[in-house]
Image (spheres, rainbow, N blue to C red):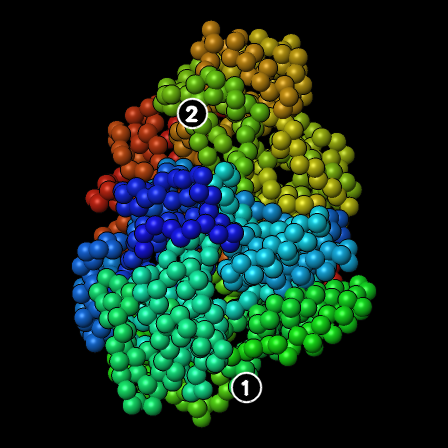
Amino acid sequence: MAFLINCPNCGHRNPYEFTFGGECKQAPGQDADMKAWCEYLFFYENMPVFQDEWWYHAMGCGEWLKIRRNIATHEIVEV
Amino acid sequence: MTGRLPESPTQVLDRTRPLKIFFDGRPIDAFEGDTVASALLAAGADTFSRSFKYHRRRSASCLSGQCGRCTMNVDGRMHVKTCQTAARDGMVVEPQGNLERDTKALADSFSWAMPTGFYYKMFYKPRWFWKRVKETIRAMPGNMGEVKPLAARPQFDAVNLTPELLVVGGGLAGMEAAITAAQAGARVVLAETDPALGGFERFQGDAGHRRAEDSIRRLQQHGTIKVLTSTTVSAIYPDGLAVCVESCGGDEKFVERSHLVRPRAMVIATGTGSMPMLFAHNDRPGVLLPEAAQRLIELWGIEPGKKVLLAGGDDYLARVALQLLDKGVKLAGLVDFRAGGLDEGLGSKLSEQGVRVWNGYTLSGSRGSKRIEGATLAALDGSDTQTVPCDTIVASSGRYPRHKLLGQIGARMVYDPELHFYLPDGLPATHQAAGRLLGLEDPEAIMAQGRLAAAAALQSLGLELAAVEQDARQQLDRAAALQAVALQPMLTENKNKKKTFVCYCHDVSEANIEQAMAEGWDNIETCKRYTTATQGACQGAMCEANFAHLMARKRPELGARVLPTTRPPVASITLGALAAGHHDHPQRSPLHQVQLEQGGQAARMGAWMRVMDFGDQEAESLAVHQAAGICDVSMLGKFRVFGPDAEKLLNRVMTKKVDNLAAGKILYYAACNQGGILIDDGVALKMGDHDYFVTTTTGRAPVTEEWFSRWRREEDWQVWMVNLTETRAGINLAGPRAREVLALLTDADISDTALPFLNWAWLEIAGVSVIAMRMGFVGELSYELLCPSSQAVFLWNRMLEVGEPLGLRPFGLEALNICRLEKGHVVPNVDTDAFTTLFESSFGWMLNRTKTETVGKPILDLIAGDEFTEQVIAFSIEGRSPVADGSLVVNGPRQLGRVTSIRYSPLLGKTIGLALVAPHEDWREGGKVRLWFDGREVEADFAKPPFHDPAGERMKM
């Protein structure tokens, strides 16, 4: 993959070391209806701009990172 | 073309080391230093491959890895570029398809039936026609080869490099850039496609050779330059990752090595290539590019032909002619399409040697069957045509930058109508271009430009190189006057456009492109897709410039010439090179080796190597029912979860509540994801205050770790987990006599009252401290003993030793499977899939209905009571059945689901199994389950598990 993730524990690493955990999203409340849950579980914003994402350093320190990444250019601004 | 020219310093052959390769079964003599293609050419081979669509004869035409026409099967590997592969003694080379008697060559006569886009037009309607002919048509393309099993699996390597500067291209400019950077203290990687440095100068006669040697000597003085030869940079990605694939030499263990280079700056000095000339039958064997002719005589001492005709429009071609004469090659003449004609000095030199020069003429066609036999010339003003006998045509209509990597960096190639050349625009400061790529011809200018490029690239990183840059700029200014750019592309009208090939890879002719443009595909991007020109194996290396020129000439109103977008990879790349570096290391349990020694048969199961059986899975399963057995269950995921918020985390991820878990009790739990899908089951033990020991199913340890820590991180809970999977081995001791076996190894009270079912205790067994859990996975009295990994082998052997007189034997995964099927135990992710909810998987009883924080609970509440969309059912067949895991469950023509686990139970005398199926009215007592296996239907009886000991008394003994 054509970008690196600067893991706070391990330094710049190849994203192949990580598991992608999807967009950071707020789960619906306990009483939310099926529609809200489906939206949450199966739909993504997936806009070609910066978004917050979860990445798990599976082949590294085993930490979950919140990353702000531009999904069009792979530019990462915040880890 | 047999025999070799006398030795010269430019040659790369070691004539003291002859070797033999085998081509199509025939031995062929070659020397160390030969490539496969040069050895074949020296032996007189003409046809190297058959073309894609029309099965026309094709021969190596560039000898530099560009044209892709020389690909063959080498030592069992398909599509190997023979011109880039060093010949090794005993190498087996086979053409891909029948070169001499190719029956499909009839397609050439039916080219009228294959207009542009014929596969879109002809097979759309009627549908039955496509069905009838598709297999035939798919078998048609030429040079496709055949996949054959290889004797040994080829190995690929991957290396990560992070230099300050990557230089692509090891010619004069590239070497100069590398030296400049090394002098400034930078670490440099220099990648060169050819097996040796020197680039274009390698084959520019003795003078060029000396220049190259001099640069190489200066380069070698710098230890900070890593030189990669035989290495193609196939892609540069947006963050600067350059994938450089090295073709390894014969002594290496690896076939190819991927260098994943992440430089901070780059100099691209990939040079130029010659454009093939467009004339009728311009693809016949014997048509060569000028560099190929130069390489043949200078590097390998091979005459390109007995009578060579040269054709083109620049003085470079005249120099090639003089070079050929110098080596004693006979020329049929030189055709120069420029109105002004050839440079007078060069022209008179040629006529002195008796070479006929046609000024203002061009090639219009060629003759010959297996190889060129003659050429037709035409005056550009149409006043005259002539035929010239010759056996080789060295033709090029101009030079063209190898620009592909620049495009990947984000540069645009802009056509300069004065120079008739494309120049890059919009390169970032850290990425510089240098050398012939920029249209330079003079060696001094090229070297100065290389220094300039390195200085500019490194200055953008903050290194101080202003003096070097200024110096280089001055030299470049002085040398610029010497620049002799004559790169005029030439296209001529000829009568047989159908056989005037633009794209050789896909047999796209000038007529095809005219037709496509007439149909409205007159933008280069759409025309390219419609005709598939530039989309073949060479990725446009041969045809792109001609394609762009042709389109621009036919539709001048469309404006400036543009090149199609370039994308990675530049050259074809093997899947092995892409996968390199991902090494597969199955995990082995601490008991793996000892079980193999005791007759265990191992197989790969997910991440683990597991022992499947000890020779007789059925006897092993019977031993578990009748006496006792031990099985390696070290693969269970094992975790310590502790901290003040441990309960919060466990309550979140488990369907059950841990708060009331008493010491010594086992909590059996299931786990769901947020969609209410069953993902795992396991047990939790309370070890102390806020301190738990948790197991997961086999192979799930890494996923569980990820899943648990996600929740911890989302909530910022004070809880930690330690993965103990590999520090604790597991032995499952099961069978009615299990307690007797255990009693022989411990003084502890292990009676049913002291350690009842679903309880656990720390025990000392044979001196080893273990966590002993009374579980019921196999349906018999059973202890799961978790011991330190280092003592597992000792404990295993001690148990065998004392147990054998009681009938104890080791059992493998297969026997374990039989026993759990007899109990009807569902294994998550084996008997369920990513759509099976907790309820559907029959684990619904494990959901704590009052606990709200459980992952997936909101969804489970919403779907509770809904009809199932799928469910797990059990079935049985009398006696033995061959039906295997994965067979379909059917009802007439409808597929209802699939068999997830099926085994023969010797205890029951039945074949029993579980299936994941859609709901159906037959899933009731007395109903039939129809399985589809091996092309026929097998009937099974619906059953309600467990098959064995329904009351569950045996595991509670």
Q: Residue at x 59, y 73 (%)?
A: B440
The answer to whether residue B371 is visible is yes
Q: Residue furthest front?
A: B352
Amino acid type of disc 2? Gln
Considering only vertical position in the picture, is B706 above or below A26?
Answer: above
- In space, the residues marked 1 and 2 are separated at their CA atoms by 74 Å
Q: Residue at x 67, y 50 (%)?
A: B220
Amino acid type of disc 1? Glu
Residue B530 image point, x, y percent: 36, 76
For label 1, the crowd category at 10 Å Cα-Cα, with few meaning under 14, some 14 to 19 and many 20 or more, is: few
The answer to whether residue B763 is visible is no
Q: How many marks?
A: 2
Quadrant location of residue B879? top left
**Of B145 and B954, the residue lying toward us:** B145
**Of B723 and B807, the residue lying toward us:** B723
User: Disc 2 sits on a residue from what chain?
Assistant: B
For discs 1 and 2, the disc positioned in front in the rendered view: 1
Q: Is B26 left, or right, of B82 in this rendering?
A: left
Q: Residue at x 57, y 55 (%)?
A: B197
Q: Which residue is mark 1?
A: B418
Q: Which residue is mark 2?
A: B601
